[in-house]
């Protein structure tokens, strides 16, 4: 065997890979770099080995909006007052808050991370966690602090923290779409009314907040339906007002 291996022909097209060799125990051993080794594997595999196919992902937005809308609607119906539904049935919200508003919306947020949507990932993951934590708060924590007489103040504080989060998400939503900006604006009003109603122990304010919550739910449902219908029909059936940046303005930003 020759002492030096200069070139190696690996396929019918005479693709050449430059290699060096070392003499070890009377044998000539080729030295390949990492790139050369990858190239060698490619040629050995031949045309029968297809390249990896990228996995296409659907839009998780409609799932997240739908989960948020349905759970918000159910809670808001109870907040709107006993004229709409018997308050004793409020426990029906628990499984929906845990699995649809919570787990499903949280999963939508994870998929938003996968498609590199920072806004959607932050919103859906956070509000999914909101519904799961709210369910735990109402059905586990509130009964333990009810005897103190300050349960409503604790609820007001809980909602205040989420109101602050929703405020800056509302600012960010301005650069996403009109429907999302409207959604967060109405949600802010809903949170604010529920906070005031709980901190001041004023049921009528909570009732008004419930009605705003119902409006919030329908705005979110519209956003969810618009994306699903527009994608399915492959045309703009329900407008959502997607923000289109101006090249002139953005170049001076």
Image (cartoon, grey):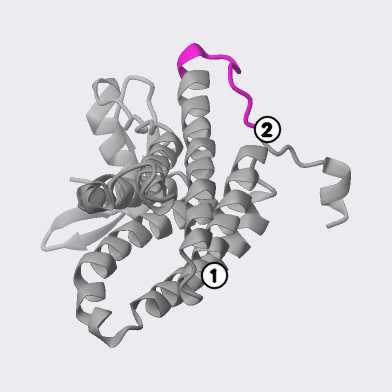
- Tell me the element at label 1: helix
Residue range in magenta is: 232-240
Residue denoted by label 2: 241
Asked which quadrant contains residue 68, the reply is top left
Magenta stretch, main secondary structure class: loop
Q: Which residue: 49% across, 63% down? A: 194
Quadrant location of the N terminus? top left
Tell me residue 231's x, y (percent): 49, 21
Residue 161 is left or right of residue 68, and the answer is right
The crowding category of the residue bearing disc 2, from other C-alpha atoms within 10 Å (few below 14, some 14 to 19, many at least 20), is few
Tell me residue 178's x, y (percent): 67, 39
Tell me residue 131's x, y (percent): 33, 57
Query: Where is 169 relative to 2, above or below?
Result: below
Tell me residue 198's x, y (percent): 46, 71
Q: Which residue: 27% across, 50% down? A: 103
* Distance from the alpha carbon under mark 1 to that under mark 2: 32 Å
Residue denoted by label 1: 196
Query: Where is 158 relative to 131, above or below?
Result: below
Residue 177 is left or right of residue 250, and the answer is left
Numbered mark located on residue 182 in the image: none
- Tell me the element at label 2: loop
233 in magenta? yes
């Amino acid at each position: 065997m020759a002492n030096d291996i200069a070139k190696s022909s690996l396929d019918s097209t005479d693709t050449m890979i430059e290699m060096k060799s070392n003499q070890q125990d009377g044998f000539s051993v080729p030295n390949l770099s990492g790139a050369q080794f990858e190239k060698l594997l490619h040629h050995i595999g031949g045309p029968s080995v297809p390249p990896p196919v990228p996995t296409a992902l659907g839009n998780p937005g409609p799932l997240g909006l739908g989960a948020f809308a349905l759970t918000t609607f159910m809670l808001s119906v109870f907040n709107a007052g006993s004229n709409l539904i018997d308050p004793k049935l409020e426990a029906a919200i628990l499984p929906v808050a845990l699995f649809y508003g919570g787990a499903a919306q949280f999963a939508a947020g994870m998929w938003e991370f996968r498609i590199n949507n920072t806004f959607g990932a932050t919103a859906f993951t956070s509000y999914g966690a909101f519904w799961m934590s709210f369910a735990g708060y109402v059905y586990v924590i509130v009964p333990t602090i009810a005897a103190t007489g300050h349960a409503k103040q604790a609820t007001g504080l809980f909602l205040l923290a989420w109101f602050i989060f929703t405020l800056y998400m509302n600012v960010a939503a301005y650069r996403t779409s009109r429907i999302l900006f409207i959604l967060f604006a109405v949600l802010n009003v809903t949170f604010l009314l529920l906070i005031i109603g709980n901190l001041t122990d004023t049921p009528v304010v909570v009732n008004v907040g419930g009605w705003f919550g119902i409006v919030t739910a329908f705005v979110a449902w519209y956003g969810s339906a618009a994306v699903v219908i527009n994608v399915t029909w492959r045309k703009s059936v329900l407008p959502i007002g997607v923000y289109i940046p101006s090249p002139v303005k953005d170049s001076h930003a």
